[in-house]
Amino acid sequence: MKVKLHHINLCSNDVAALDEFYRTVLDLEREPSMEAMRATTTDSYDGKVAFVTDGTTQMHLAQKDFNVGFRTGQIVNPLAKGHIAFRTDDMDAFIKRLEAKGIAYSDYGDWAIKGWRQIFFHDPDGNVVEVHAETA
């Protein structure tokens, strides 16, 4: 099983300003392929999101939403403070690892991005961590 850093998600009340900042100050480029992959709806999450990249690692800049966990019935809310995300090539093996270590997680399925199964959990300091795998 491989796990590698994929993206960092920052949450903001002003996504446009955050997008402008990272593109003009750090010369990140827009990541247009991600916008077409969004699978959000008004009953889960339909906030503003900008996708930027340095060519290797992405940043997902998302509108804060403190009620996502309530609407989705999930314990972990990835859109309150943001999260760091890793991609794995074997989600089942990764979930077995979490369960063996007694780490609770929320399985969002392909809730936000078409073709990605996403799970979220907390690190020991309460930071939200995502692990996702491509499903298509």
Image (cartoon, helix red, strand yellow):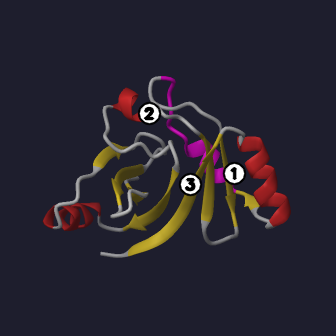
Q: Quadrant of residue 93?
A: bottom left
Q: Which residue is mark 3?
A: 9
Quadrant into which the N terminus falls:
bottom left
Q: Which residue is mark 1?
A: 32
Q: Is residue 91 magenta?
A: no
Q: Position of residue 61 (x, y in %)?
A: 64, 49
Tell me which numbered mark, 2 or 3, is placed earlier along the sequence: 3
Q: Which residue is mark 2?
A: 68
Q: Amino acid at mark 3?
A: Asn
With respect to residue 83, does 79 lie above or below? above
Report the Cα–Cα distance between label 2 and label 1.
24 Å
Q: Is residue 39 magenta?
A: yes
Secondary structure under badge 3? strand
> Which numbered mark, 2 or 1, is in the foreground of this view?
2
Front residue (pair 35, 136): 35
Q: Which residues are magenta?
A: 31-42
Image side of residue 24 versus residue 65, left or right? right
Query: Pointer 1: residues within 10 angstroms few (<14), some, or many (20+)?
Result: few
Q: Quadrant of residue 16?
A: top right
